[in-house]
Image (cartoon, helix red, strand yellow):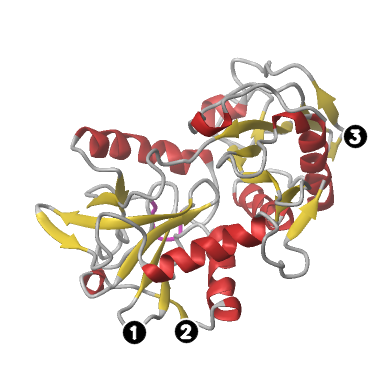
Amino acid sequence: MDKKQIDWGNLGFAYMPTEQRYVSNYKDGAWDEGGLTTDANVVISECAGVLQYAQTVFEGLKAYTTEDGRTVTFRPDLNASRLKDSAERLEMPAFPEDRFVEAVKQVVKANEAYVPPYGSGATLYLRPYLFGTNPVIGVKPADEFQFRVFCTPVGPYFKGGVKPLTLRVCDFDRAAPHGTGHIKAGLNYAMSLHAIVTAHEEGFDENMYLDSATRTKVEETGGANFLFVTKEGTVVTPKSSTILPSITRRSLLYVAEHYLGLKVEEREVPFEEVKDMAECGLCGTAAVISPVGKIVDHGKEICMPSGMDEMGPVTKKLYDTLTGIQMGRIEAPEGWIVEI
């Protein structure tokens, strides 16, 4: 298939409409058969549950062109499982996991001309999401829902590529204990918008959120998990019931242990420990890993030994190995790569 005439190397992380998307509706206790549509518009009641009480969850994953020219996605079964968990937490019917994966495949195949070529640095970003559609004026779950998947070609999430980021320790809380921080709900991201806007206004790239209960432990940023490397070379990620379980983080920990032979720890990370770390990065679907060079705690700077010029050596090995797996340069563990 001929690719679209797009300046792939200069794409930002922004929405570009593509030709087809997937839609399925839930009514009277069941999902319909669903299918592709060219209509990019969503038409719902002014009183829809999603508009009144933010009853919506979503996912994010990518499709790539591998080195040998195949079009693939990365671990979509885990996105399907996480969407199920998110939906159940917000009293929404889970979209069947096998149908989720099939819907992703259909959308990628229908829009294959928008899958960026290998080596361009760009990818096809897929956004599955689920929301309440019928009128709800009393505070209660909706009865009818819609599941959709659209895609858009994107460049790097953080402009400037691997340039290390500067973070601030945020005074706002991202998620409460026993709340919804562990699911991918739209309402979590709405809560982070004011914090990220003010961070950018003050010259920071992102926020570091601490746990809301004690404000002593590292949680995550508004859209990515943290990954640290100790001076002894151990890869450490924060563990908390209010952190979104990142598929990228999970994959990186596996790569660290099984491909690179590194010691791995998933545990609580006291903020007091951060100053003693050798490397720090943000990991997630959109960015894979973005290095962090500096963290500012109310005027007090923590400068990572890896510096402000490039990724630290361990972070770079992790990035190169995982992206090598995704792009087909390195053999993947069984089931990680799904070919379209």
In this orientation, which residue lies closer to the viewer: 279 or 184? 279
**Left or right of 307 on screen, residue 222:** right
Question: Residue sitting at 20 percent across and 38 percent down?
Answer: 203
Residue at which label 1 appears: 232
**Left or right of 286 on screen, residue 231:** left
Q: Amino acid at mark 3?
A: Glu
Which is in the foreground here, disc 2 or disc 3?
Answer: 2
Q: Are marks 2 and 3 in contact (CB under 8 Å)?
A: no
Question: Residue sitting at 30 percent across and 67 percent down?
Answer: 217
Taking the image as drawn, is residue 187 in sight?
yes
Which segment did they paint magenta?
175-179
Q: Residues within 10 Å of mark 2 (few under 14, many from 20)?
A: some
**Left or right of 262 on screen, residue 35:** right
Q: Amino acid at mark 2?
A: Lys
Question: Residue sitting at 34 percent across and 64 percent down?
Answer: 280
Residue 294 lies in what quarter of the image? bottom left
Residue at which label 2 appears: 263
Q: CA distance from mark 2 to mark 3?
A: 46 Å
Residue at which label 3 appears: 33
